[in-house]
Image: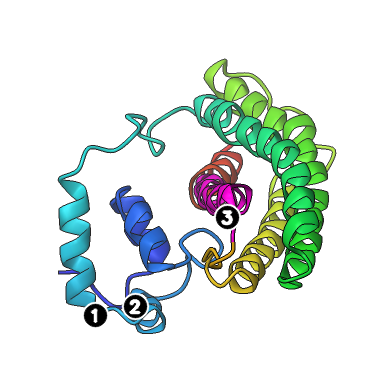
Amino acid sequence: MLSSDKTVREVVLELPQAARVFEKLKIDYCCGGDKPLGEACATAGVELANLDRMLAEAGQTPGNGSIDFQKATLGALVGHILDKHHVYTKEEMARLEPLIDKVIGAHGGNHPELRGLGGLFQQLCADLKPHMFKEEQILFPYIVEMERSVVQNRPAPIAPFGTVINPIRMMMMEHETVGDLLRELRALSSNYTLPPDGCISYQTLYQALEAFEQDLHQHIHLENNILFPRAIALEGNR
């Protein structure tokens, strides 16, 4: 039986299938991972016993990946984040920006909330692009090189930012901003509910935005809850 005092982060680290369940229940496991499970369940309107059952059932369903991120090298974890999540995020931003404009042009008169949604998505993209650039060009290469120096028993690389904690703290703050924007997008779209007069493009947009949200949740979870704590611990053990 789950303990209400456990944090959401602890549960999703112990039970990777919990991410799928938390997505379904709209429980924040990436930026809000420090919240006690009891509090998260109360907010989501689900009994702890029911969550326990859902997690047990999810554990019997094969997952879509076989990587144990807790045991993988940091280099492998960084590679996974870049190849799976950064590539997807960039491709979807490029695809969705013109799609949003198209839907606004067709339905903006009857659905003024679409213009707000378009503005929020533009802000999200404007935040994500430099964020990922800093990870790809500065933070991730440093983490990989730091791990390599341990394996090869040589001095740690010079950190222009003093300690890895500094850029990680900044990345996590930026993740909070991304999480806030995702929540605003969901609220403005009424949980991505297609209106009766919505066309195929409207439906495609909402489905894509929801998938984009879910991928960002997993993306941020891997960084906040696994990569960053392991990088900080590695630096501390040097």
| Quarter of the N terminus within the rendering | bottom left
Q: Residue 135 carries which label?
A: none
Residue tagged 3 = 206
Asked whether residue 180 appears in the rendered view, the answer is yes
Q: Where is residue 132 in the image (x, y as percent from the top left)?
A: 74, 40
Cα–Cα gap, marks 1 and 3: 29 Å
| Quarter of the C terminus within the rendering | top right
Mark with earlier residue (3, 2): 2
Is residue 153 shown above or below 214?
Answer: above
The kind of residue tagged 3 is: Tyr
Secondary structure of the residue carrying numbered label 1 = loop
Q: Position of residue 70 (x, y in %)?
A: 39, 39
Cα–Cα gap, marks 2 and 1: 6 Å
Residue tagged 2 = 41
Cα–Cα gap, marks 3 and 2: 26 Å
Q: What stretch is highlighted in magenta?
A: 198-223
Task: Identify the residue at image location x=77%, y=58%.
Answer: 104
Q: Residue 47 carries which label?
A: 1
Relative to residue 25, is residue 120 drawn left or right?
right
Q: Where is residue 153 in the image (x, y as percent from the top left)?
A: 57, 19
* Image quadrant assignment for residue 93: top right
CB contact under 8 Å: marks 2 and 1:
yes
Relative to residue 22, is residue 133 drawn left or right?
right
Task: Identify the residue at image location x=76%, y=72%.
Answer: 112
In magenta stretch: residue 225: no
Is residue 162 shown above or below 18?
Answer: above
Mark with earlier residue (2, 1): 2
